[in-house]
Image: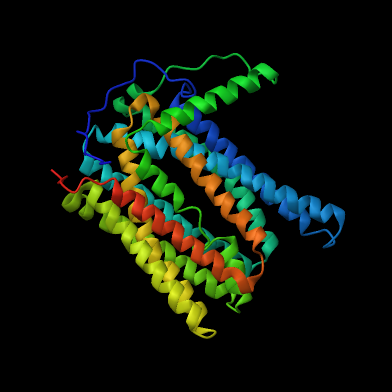
Amino acid sequence: MTMSVQPTQLYTAPTSCQPGDRTPRLGAAVSMYRLQNAAVALSAFSAFLASFLTQGSLTFWICILATIFIGSVSSVGCQGSSLSVEREWTKALCHGNSDSLASLNAGMRRIDLTCLIASPVMASLIMTLASIRVAVVAILVWNMLAWWPECRLLQLAQHFSPLLRQQELAPASQEAPRLSLKSFRNSVAQSREAWQIYRSQAVFPAALALAMLYLTVMSFGLLMTAYLKWRGMLEATLGLYRAAGALAGIGATLCFSALHARLGLEGAGPVGLVCQWASLVVTLVLSSVLMHPAGSHVLAAGLVASRFGLWAFDLAVSQMLQERVPLEQLGVVNGMQSSLQSLLQSLSYAVGLLIWQPQLFIILMGGSVLTVSGALVLYLSIIDPENKPA
């Protein structure tokens, strides 16, 4: 099986809407920003209430669970706004120019990663100079105040860009959804159809390879954080390594445009994935044989190095989806991609619950490296070696 380069098509407005992809993009983005900011604010409010309660009491745990659950809801808004703006608007603005799209995607990802560094630093400063309660209140107030300018800036962007106004899809039916067996069956049918649309794309194997990278503990997620703390690493040190990982990702965004111009998407993808795989293999070997605390720092440093390859590969596959999926199906395909990535990430947490002993964490690490190896083999198997970038 080969993945040949398809000519990049110029942007044209869709003439019809696919099932499950009918919502106007501006309206969807505004709704998602409201959901995200409101959920973060409510989550912060719940955490603020918990700080006044007796630890271990029933009301304390209710507030903690509410904080976690509502915070999880905010991720839905984050994903929705990303699908509406970062994936589709960028494609429309670049008007079919692949190099411009690569630069714009890299620039937006660079902004995301910069915020990923700045936000915990600011929260830590507030907690250090004031208190945790003040930091929580600051987060609450910030999200209450930020949603209006966010949404207003989106409206202005569309107002001043004919391309974005042209891209808006036809509005969906205004009929309110009703909870019924029929509506449930319709939702199941739409989900099945969305999966079929996603599965039928020529770029599906590359998208699957990217999703496989989320079935891992070899990142600065909850499981790895708990493991490194069990090995004696301080929270402040972990924070520095997380920031370094984000910086490595920023480095990938700075290099991606040059990789794209020289090697094309098919060439840039393997460079990133091979870098990630090599970093993780070396990290697994060294961290398992070195004694504490050197092994812990080698593990964290290896994770930092792997972020470069991860984000380079992510940018390559994301642009493949933008360029090679028909515009009227792009929302459905990107939605399925995000859902699959979230599902596999949740599966990694579930495996962590089954193998919960820290002494056995090396098994999860080895399995994660095997998954990345599988993604690499899958991606390399679909590349046409005769394909050369224009």
Q: Residue farthest to the front?
A: 1
Looking at the image, residue 382 sits to the left or right of residue 245; the answer is left
Looking at the image, residue 208 sits to the left or right of residue 128; the answer is left
Whether residue 153 appears in this view of the structure is no
Quadrant containing the N terminus in the rendered view: top left
**Would you identify the image quadrant in which residue 24 lies?**
top left
Is 229 in front, or is 183?
183
Count numbered badges in the picture: 0
* Rendering coords of residue 321 (x, y %): 34, 38
Placement of 37 over or under 16, stated as above or below: below
Placement of 28 over or under 67, stated as above or below: above
Residue found 26% across the figure and 41% down from its top: 3
Is 216 in front, or is 82?
216
* Rendering coords of residue 57 (x, y %): 86, 58
Q: Residue farthest to the bottom?
A: 291
Whether residue 205 appears in this view of the structure is yes
Residue found 45% across the figure and 28% down from its top: 196
Residue found 66% across the figure and 56% down from its top: 136
Looking at the image, residue 378 sits to the left or right of residue 125; the answer is left
Is 30 in front, or is 91?
91
* Rendering coords of residue 328 (x, y %): 37, 24
Quadrant containing the C terminus in the rendered view: top left
Residue found 63% across the figure and 66% down from its top: 127
Looking at the image, residue 121 sits to the left or right of residue 382; the answer is right
Placement of 226 over or under 271, stated as above or below: below
* Rendering coords of residue 215 (x, y %): 51, 54
Q: How is the image coloured?
A: rainbow
Placement of 289 over or under 376, stated as above or below: below
